Image: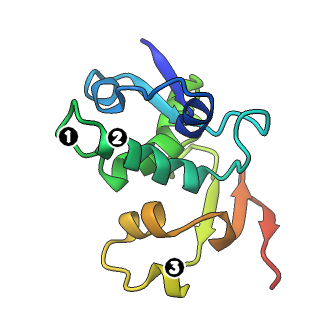
Amino acid sequence: GSSIAHCPKSNAKFGHGYAPLEKMLDAGIAVGLGSDSVASNNICDLLEEGRFASLVARNRADTERLIAAEEILRMATLGGAQALGMGEEIGSLEPGKQADIAIISLSSDAQQPVNEIAACVVFSSSGRDVLSTIVAGEERYRRTA
């Protein structure tokens, strides 16, 4: 099957338009969320990229379908793994898969009130809220202050 690396901020910066995200998801295409690179995206923050992807999709005049926060989180995790052909090894927390985890604080003033966790992560969080990252079960980053 087909897969897509969706980098909406890079597309916007270069004026390439916007991808029909809801059509790709509805067609069962593996969509991974990406940030491209610093050559085309000044801030490579996957949480910010997810928020931008959702807001751009919601602002399109040719669709009434809203991309749910859960769909954005899936694109940032399992969707990306599937797009890389690695969905059996990474992308979700399941027995036998590599444990890759980002621990995100939901306690900043900008995130309050937390009514829905997925929506809070997508619409109110950024890389600044990441407390720790774990790759293959090994902690690689821990915020110290």
Residue 87 in sight: no
| Relative side of 117 to 48, left or right | left
Distance from Cα at disc 3 to Cα at disc 1: 27 Å
Q: Height in image: 99 above or below 13?
A: below
* Residue 39, quarter of the rendered image: top right
In the displayed orientation, state which residue is furthest to the front. 15
Q: Position of residue 38 (x, y in %)?
A: 78, 39
Q: Position of residue 129 (x, y in %)?
A: 63, 73
* Circles 3, 1 touching at the beta carbon (< 8 Å): no
Query: What residue is shown at x 54% (from left), y 43% (from top)?
Result: 91
Q: Residues within 10 Å of mark 1 (few under 14, many from 20)?
A: few
Quadrant (top left/top right/bottom left/bottom right) for the N terminus: top left
Q: Residues within 10 Å of mark 3 (few under 14, many from 20)?
A: some
Q: Residues within 10 Å of mark 2 (few under 14, many from 20)?
A: many
Question: Which SS class for mark 1?
Answer: loop
For label 1, the residue is 65
Tell me which amino acid carries mark 3.
Leu
Tell me which amino acid carries mark 1.
Arg
Q: Nearer the viewer, mark 3 or mark 1?
A: 1
In the displayed orientation, state which residue is furthest to the top. 1
For label 3, the residue is 106
* Circles 1, 2 touching at the beta carbon (< 8 Å): yes
For label 2, the residue is 57
Distance from Cα at disc 1 to Cα at disc 2: 8 Å
In depth, the one of 125 and 31 nearer the eye is: 125
Q: Earlier in the sequence, mark 1 or mark 2?
A: 2
Q: Position of residue 44 (x, y in %)?
A: 70, 48
Residue 76 in sight: yes
Q: Height in image: 15 above or below 100?
A: above
Distance from Cα at disc 2 to Cα at disc 3: 25 Å
Q: Earlier in the sequence, mark 2 or mark 3?
A: 2
